[in-house]
Each structure stands twice: as C-alpha cells, then as structure tokens.
Image (cartoon, helix red, strand yellow):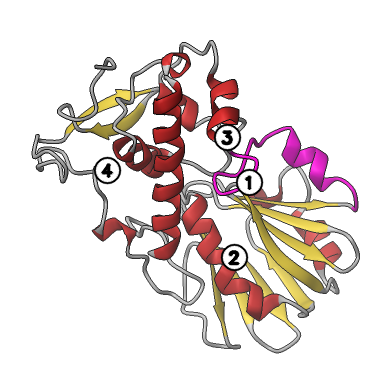
Amino acid sequence: MPELPEVETVRSRLAPALAGRTFERVDILDERLTRPFEPRTVAAELEGERVESVERRGKYLIFRFESGRVLLIHLRMTGSLRHARRGKLPDDPHRRAVVRLDDGSDVAYRDVRRFGTWLLLEPGELDEYLAARLGHEPLGTDFTPKELGSQLAGRRAPIKALLLDQRLLAGVGNIYADEALWYGRLHPLRPGGELSPAELGDLHRGVRRAIRKGIERQGASLRDYSTPDGDRGAMQDEFVVYGRTGEPCLRCGTPIEKTRVGGRGTWFCPGCQRRKAS
C-alpha cells in the first residue's frame, strides 16, 4: 500500500501540472471506484471543476477546486496516477478512470486490485471527514514526543500495531513503521504504554527520520507504485530492516528476523531491538 512518502511524492509531482487546470472531461470506468455513487454522476459533477491546489493528508490525496468542492482520492493497495500529454498514455488493462485537462493532457488512475476510492465532497465537508479518521501528521509541528506519549499512555497493544492506527498517526504504514522502530531501537511487540520518556523521544525521531528518508527517495517501488511520470521510487534500495530476513543488521550485525504483529509481516533486529527495555 502506498504510504505517506509515496502519496506525498504523487502530490508533489501532480501539483504543478494540475494547479489552475480544469477537468474538461472525466471518464470513470469502474463502478467500484465511486461506490455508493454512480460513476457517471460523479464524472458529470467533476467536469468543469478548476483545480486550486493538490494537497495530502495522511494517505489521502486532496484535489481542491475553486468551487470549494474537494475530490478525495485514496490509493489503497495498488492505486496510482499517471500524467501524460494527450495520446501518450500507454494501454493499460487496469485503468479505472481518465481525466482530460483543459491543456490537452490526461491524468489516468490505475488500480490492479480495485480497492482505491474517489469521493467528491461538498464545501465544508472535508475537515470533519478527515478529523474522524486521521491523527497527527508525522512531520507536523503538533506531533511531539509529549503528544505521542499522551496518545500511547495506558495502551497495551504492541507499538507496531499502534503506529499503523491512522487515528493515532496519519500516513504511517507497514514499511515505515518497521523502519521507524529500527531507528528507535524498539521491539515491535513492546506495549505502547510502557515506553519511557527517552524511548518516546527515540520513537518520535525514528518516525520522522523514516518518513523524511522515504520522501527524499521518492517512495518505495515494490510492486505497483510509480510516480505520475512513470518513474520508480528508490527507497526499496535503502531499507534498513523491512524485507531483510536473515541479512545482517546494519547497526549490530545480528541477522534480521521476521514475525507478525496484528497480522502484518514485521521485520526487526533481535540484537538491538530488545523485547524488554534494558
């Protein structure tokens, strides 16, 4: 699933091309994309809308229109967006929607597993919608070690599972949670509520470091993810722990192990990410 760094990369690539452009024609080719609303109805509503900005909140892409409306896109497992000049989009059996812009270029949405969603919101609806679903932005000024501690206080769930809770921390997924915990030297099964103030500081720095590195590398291309220009990300070449079963830890040399936390594959170093605080 595209996580914060991948979605932010998509946003940063699309924003200059879409700002000020009008949705001239919209074809939604998969009824699942806009459920429970009819694709043709949503497409007709989108036609004529002029883009004011392209933003991101957590894993959501936010297309703000000058009318005050918002198109909220969640890529889910395998969604991606491609921007190309008219007639330059390659054939794609997994294409689910195409937007023709008033400069003649196209934005195509592809989704192999068809879990992604497009939701058109009316003016004033966005803040309430997101507030009910998302917590702090990992790179935001309101995400501090103290605030993190208050969110984790009394929680017995494993810290890895808590990092994946979007209501606690928006945009962190399986990859960057593992990377963050490695940077923080924290075992993924440690109960979130038992972290000391020093460990909360380590975790806070680890989350920010993992997310910033992912953005700098334009995300991780493991299967379906690519940028709107068709480029691959580079983060997959620099994982410190994710997917490295049996390989030596880059910090202590101990072989990396894999376990499962909350049903998710989880990688960690048993040498420097101890189950209990020393």
Name the residue carrying label 4: 242
State which mark lies toward you, 2 or 1.
1
Tag 4: residue type?
A: Tyr
Give the magenta-colored segment's residue range.
123-143
Tag 2: residue type?
A: Arg
State which mark lies toward you, 4 or 1.
1
Q: Based on the picture, tell me whether residue 5 belongs to the magenta stretch.
A: no
Q: Position of residue 145 (x, y in %)?
A: 53, 32
**Between 171 and 117, which is closer to the camera in this rendering?**
171
Q: Position of residue 102 (x, y in %)?
A: 76, 85
Tell me what residue is drawn at x 71 percent, y 50 percent: 34
Q: Position of residue 223 (x, y in %)?
A: 34, 56
> Label 4, label 3: how many angstroms apart (C-alpha)?
20 Å
> Label 1, label 3: how many angstroms apart (C-alpha)?
17 Å
Name the residue carrying label 2: 11
Tag 1: residue type?
A: Thr
Q: Position of residue 112 (x, y in %)?
A: 46, 55
Establish if 76 lies above or below 42: above
* Mark before the other along the chain sequence, 4 or 3: 3
- Element under disc 2: helix
Q: Are marks 4 and 3 in contact (CB under 8 Å)?
A: no
Name the residue carrying label 3: 166
State which mark lies toward you, 1 or 3.
1
